[in-house]
Image (cartoon, rainbow, N blue to C red):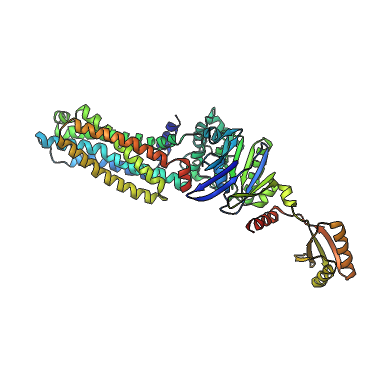
Amino acid sequence: MKAWLIAWREIRWEVFLDRASLLRTGIFVLLPLFLVLANGGIGRGAGGDAALLGIAVQCVIFPAFSGVALIAATFTAEKENGTLVPLLAAPIRDLDIVVGKLGGMVITVMAASLVTLGAGYVIAAYRYGLARVAEVFTPELLYALLVLAFLYLITTGSITMIVAARVRSSRAAQQLAGLVIAFSAALFGGLGFIASQLGEGWPLLGLGVALVLFDVLALELARRAWQRGEVIARV
Amino acid sequence: MRGVTRRFDGLIALDDVSFTVQPGEIVALLGPNGAGKTTASRIIGGILTPSEGDVLVDDVSLRNDPNTVRSRCGFVTDQPSLYERMPLRAYLTFFGRLYDVHEPARRAAELAKLLGLDDVLDRRLGTFSRGMRQKVAIARALVHDPPVLLLDEPATALDPEMAQTLRSFIVSLRARHRAILLTTHDLDEAQRIADRVVVLFRGRVVRIGATGEIRSAGKPQYTVTFAGDGALARTALSRVGIDAQPASGSDGLSALRFTTDDPVRTNGQALRALIDANVQVVTLSVDERSLEDAYMQILQEARA
């Protein structure tokens, strides 16, 4: 319940009233849609299917990239402005603070991913035909992509939180968030490619399970990094 | 606090610190920079955990039940640290909900009225002046009506009028049986409102006592003011065994200061010696030692 209070505050008063956050998220939402519009044409067969799949992945993952920067900004801003001290003095668990702050960003970014995916679907259907798009964009695939974006956000968000707990300035945190985005994009792309080469079904499921396990580990590490004593010692 | 020690990466910030604050009492926590004052108040407020020892608030142990301890403490820091984008009403209501306050929106309005902020309830905190922001920080600390208040340099950067208003407010909270720990560098403020004083030096308690007791500790000092030659007067006093030191006089008068354990005998001797030496004595008075003087002496002893 208290985690939700913190999450709602983040969404209502930090994300929606921060022009820089809105602009950054907007760019990451519009960029994949622009790529759909700019794409010349999608052919039949496996190549066309792969191109459509790429469009769908871009629509969910690009907004998720903006989420990593958002998470870095919110945590370091709390440290820099000292607003973390009253929060840590309140009768709430460390986990509520971590989950609340992370949750606020994840909800926002997942909403952006959902909107981008929906808009991408509509634009792609308009450009390449509804039947062709529906053939590749199955409900299961769309669901799997959203779950992938969610797992990506939790994992990279947790790593970014650990980084934010250690660094002193938001500039340093933003730079490290950029590195996390670049590294995670390469890692996800590589793992996804390997999984797709190994065949359908099990390798992708294995990747998902590995991500969930990594999420649990990263969240636990983030919770430890944001323990009251640890954070305050560095404020 | 009971035997609290706190280490940061091998550095001892607090070393076996123990003291109490009773309901209806203001205790001033004094000490030079780096003495461990802020660490102590952060430990009591449940923000930091002690490496050793414990804190009891209403017999609830910080180690066993930190959230209950936090819910019984209100914490004000030197920096108000507010969420700038939030309006006052939303801000206080948010903290009210975090502290499980019944009807938090009503409590927010009530506190705003109490602190004279009711006409800016819907204004964003980023537009508030320094004094208003500090009032908001106090309102935030009081949102759950805590029995213990931890005030860490609350008057820093406030103008004298605002600092006076804040002081009166703190005193009014004492009248409502709050236990108040005031961390401050402002010894004048501590002297005016603190019932007791705890002096920390390099993480250790070097003096605890009632403010009056600490001020009056040590040999009383006396100042004699006179018209005439200071050297002559000093020589006259030294002839009767009084070691007097020059002090600052006023209205063109000279002044000498001396200490004694036996003012009945020594002061009479001093007056006779001065009159015999044709020194025109104007006053002989006991010095009220300020808390600042006492504090400086305590630190000097601690360093020695």
Residue B115 lies, in percent from the top left, at 60, 39
Q: Quadrant of residue A53?
A: top left
* Quarter in which the C terminus of chain B is drawn: bottom right
Task: Determine whether B246 is above or below A215 in the image.
Answer: below
Choose between B40 and A108: the one closer to the eye.
B40
Total tally of numbered discs in the picture:
0
Q: Is residue A145 left or right of residue B215?
A: left
Measuring 82% from the left and 65% from the top, which residue is drawn there?
B242
Measuring 20% from the left and 35% from the top, which residue is drawn there?
A123
Task: Determine whether B130 is above or below A47 in the image.
Answer: below
* Quarter in which the N terminus of chain B is drawn: top right
Q: Quadrant of residue B239?
A: bottom right
Choose between B293 and B86: the one closer to the eye.
B293
Report if residue A150 is visible in the image: no
Choose between A83 and B158: the one closer to the eye.
A83
Residue B44 lies, in percent from the top left, at 57, 40
Report if residue A204 is visible in the image: yes
Residue A17 lies, in percent from the top left, at 40, 40
Q: Is residue B97 left or right of residue A167?
A: right
Choose between A115 and A45: the one closer to the eye.
A45
Residue A178 lies, in percent from the top left, at 31, 48
Q: Is residue B256 left or right of residue A76?
A: right
